[in-house]
């Protein structure tokens, strides 16, 4: 088998492995293998020369192109403050586990169960207003208190 074909197939192998392994690093070894195949096609290189070309091109492409290509492949994304699109203002929930400050309880709200904290003791079954949502934690108060 010719070294050019061998390096080309090794490059394809690295690219296939990249699909199964996260991290976006093995891809550059595939590029290094393809660069080595081109170098062997144009120049007569010994095995140590081929390995040197492979190592050098893999590292150079990794260092120079990884950040840029990662941005190209991942695209643009917008950070959302919470994982569930729920409006905390004017929302209510039901306490499913007593909230005893400073300990947290649990609230059913927006179709899910959330960890909840409050400034006062709130017992199970109480309807509460959601005051604030911070990631997976909600701050609540009893409905009666807010209406006063």
Image: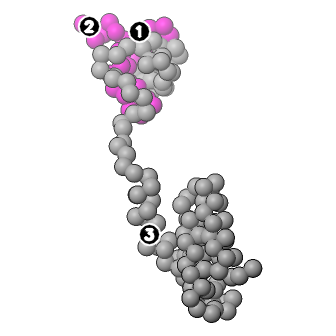
Q: Earlier in the sequence, mark 1 or mark 2?
A: 1
Disc 2 is placed on an element classified as: helix
Residue at 57% in and 85% down: 39
Tell me if residue 117 comes above or below residue 15 in the rendering.
above
Nearest to viewer (mark 2 / mark 3): 3
Q: Are marks 2 and 3 in contact (CB under 8 Å)?
A: no
Tell me if residue 72 comes above or below residue 144 in the rendering.
below
Quarter holding residue 73: bottom left
Disc 1 is placed on an element classified as: strand
Q: Which residue is mark 2?
A: 147
Gap in Å between the C-alphas at discs 2 and 3? 58 Å
Tell me if residue 23 comes above or below residue 3 in the rendering.
above
Nearest to viewer (mark 1 / mark 3): 3
Q: Which residue is mark 1?
A: 127
Residue at 32% in and 6% down: 144
Magenta residues span 119-148
Which residue in the rendered view is the most extreme toward the left?
Answer: 148
Q: Position of residue 10 (x, y in %)?
A: 67, 71
């Amino acid at each position: 088998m010719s070294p050019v074909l061998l390096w080309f197939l090794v490059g394809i192998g690295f690219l296939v492995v990249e699909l199964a392994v996260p991290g976006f690093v093995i891809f550059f070894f595939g590029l290094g293998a393809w660069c080595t195949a081109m170098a062997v096609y144009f120049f007569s290189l010994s095995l140590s020369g081929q390995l040197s070309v492979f190592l050098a091109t893999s590292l150079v492409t990794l260092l120079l192109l990884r950040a840029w290509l990662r941005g190209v492949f991942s695209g643009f994304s917008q950070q959302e403050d919470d994982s569930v699109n729920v409006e905390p203002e004017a929302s209510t929930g039901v306490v499913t586990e007593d909230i005893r400050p400073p300990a947290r309880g649990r609230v059913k709200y927006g179709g899910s169960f959330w960890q909840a904290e409050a400034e006062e003791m709130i017992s199970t079954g109480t309807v509460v207003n959601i005051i604030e949502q911070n990631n997976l934690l909600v701050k609540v108060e009893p409905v009666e208190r807010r209406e006063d």
